[in-house]
Amino acid sequence: MRIAFLGAPGSGKGTQAQRLMDRYRIPQVSTGDLLRAAVANATPLGLKAKEAMDAGKLVADEIVIGMLKERLARDDAAGGFILDGYPRNLSQAQALDALLADLGKPLDAVVLFEVPKDELVRRISGRRTCRHCGRVFNVFSSPPAKGERCPKSGGGHDLFQRPDDNEQTVAQRLEVYEQQTKPLVELYGGRGLLERIDATGQLEEVTARLRDALEKERKSAKPAKTTAKKKAKG
Ligand code: ADP
């Protein structure tokens, strides 16, 4: 499965990608995580990216696209991937098309996570990440279970709030989503790839809706792939 998750900041793309990885045995490819790692390692790219991220703006396309190419070339992405937070504008979508066309592996589905704006703001303000294992929690809706241990630190989870999860930056990120990312809904809808899911409610409920949507796509995609193969063989 080659899937992209589309949705506003706080719509739960990362959380659901983490939950789905095991089921489909494909990695979560989060450009946000790749960028945060570059920032943490103070690489030249990371230093450039940090300014845009702190301001809630998109990091320059060439940086993000370069990172994505490198990540998708790794072995674990050969059998599929979940793109989380990419593409975020039209030119990134075009770059992805070109990249996947080169590999002969187009996207199977694009899932749109739908959540009302007031709920997005509430979720983002409660979001906390474990410094060691990267798991995402929410102090309101999904705190770590009592006694739960972080697999990397051995102890409890060491939670921190992302620096771009403050009120002002969040408002800017939501604006960027509306202006630059939302047009992709129409693009992928027109290609028949879009699955909309209601991403409100309990984590498990959203995962179930997501699985249903992906199974539906998988079934409907199979005949098309077989035909394409036959044609290619001539
Ligand atoms: P969220 O979806 O909650 O905004 P992410 O971790 O996906 O969180 O992104 C955090 C920040 O990283 C974004 O605000 C942006 O600055 C940068 N970023 C992530 N993905 C991209 C991308 N595809 N293109 C440009 N910038 C990106």
Image: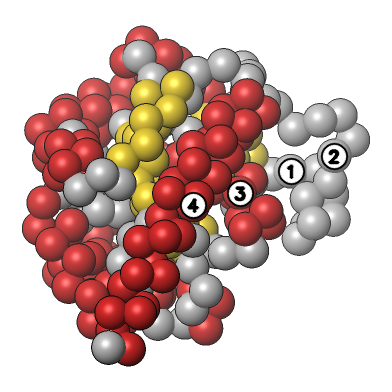
Q: Secondary structure at mark 4?
A: helix
- Decide which of 133, 191 is in the foreground and name it: 191
- Decide which of 48, 74 is in the foreground and name it: 74
Q: Nearer the viewer, mark 3 or mark 2?
A: 3
For the residues labelled 3 and 2, the Cα–Cα distance comes to: 20 Å
Amino acid tagged 2: Glu
Q: Please give the label number shown on residue 218.
A: 4
Q: Position of residue 92 (x, y in %)?
A: 17, 59
The answer to whether the residue labelled 1 contacts the one labelled 2, judged by CB atoms less than 8 Å apart, is yes
Q: To which residue does mark 2 refer?
A: 148
> Badge 4 local density, few (<14 within 10 Å), some, or many (20+)?
some
For the residues labelled 3 and 4, the Cα–Cα distance comes to: 15 Å
Q: Nearer the viewer, mark 2 or mark 4?
A: 4
At a point 50% along the width and 18% down the height, the residue shown is 200
Amino acid tagged 1: His
For marks 1 and 2, the one nearer the N-term is 2
Q: Please, is residue 50 above or below residue 193 in the view? A: below
For marks 3 and 2, the one nearer the N-term is 3
Q: Please give the label number shown on residue 157.
A: 1
Outermost residue toward the top? 118
